[in-house]
Image: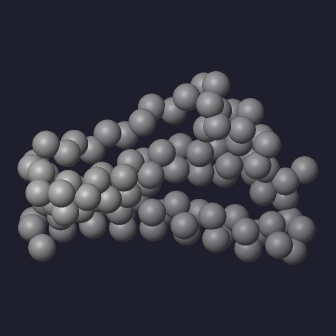
Amino acid sequence: MAPADLRALIGIALSFRPLMIMVVSTGRRAMPGRKVSPRIYECIMHMLPIAEAHLRYALRRQAWRALGWNVREVKLEILTRSRTGPTSRDASRSIAPR
């Protein structure tokens, strides 16, 4: 495994772990019927694009390597948070329980 691949793997672990901890702890709070702050859902919506970008980066590196292409040309691109897309404030309200 190349050092850059190790960095890609660590990037996935470091971006998905806090996201999953947040989701699991929120689910545990919501299961007995306790109210969960809307700020938690906003935080999840901020963390999701970062985690997705790290995963996409690692998968793209593996695909380029399998095709025999130069993996050094693959760059980590973190998507900006769209105000009108699925990560907008309205979307976070739509996933929040009522």
Identity of the residue furthest to the top in this view: 84
* Residue under the image location 24 percent in, 62 percent down: 62
Is 69 in front, or is 72? 69
Is residue 32 shown to the viewer in this render?
A: yes
Examine the rendered structure and indicate whether residue 88 appears above or below residue 30.
Answer: above
Instruction: Give coordinates of residue 59: x percent, y percent.
Output: 32, 59
* Residue under the image location 66 percent in, 51 percent down: 40
On the picture, is 81 further left or further right than 15?
right
Total numbered labels: 0
- Occupied quadrant, residue 77: top left
Is 22 in front, or is 62? 62
On the picture, is 13 further left or further right than 86?
left
On the picture, is 50 further left or further right than 44?
left
Examine the rendered structure and indicate whether residue 89 appears above or below residue 26.
Answer: above
Is residue 8 shown to the viewer in this render?
A: no
Examine the rendered structure and indicate whether residue 3 appears above or below residue 67.
Answer: below
* Residue under the image location 80 percent in, 66 percent down: 30
- Occupied quadrant, residue 85: top right
* Residue under the image location 64 percent in, 37 percent down: 86
Which of the colour schemes (rainbow, by chain, secondary structure, one colour) is used? one colour
Instruction: Give coordinates of residue 25: x percent, y percent.
Output: 65, 69
Q: In the rendered view of the protein, which quadrant contains the N terminus?
A: bottom left
On the picture, is 52 further left or further right than 65?
right
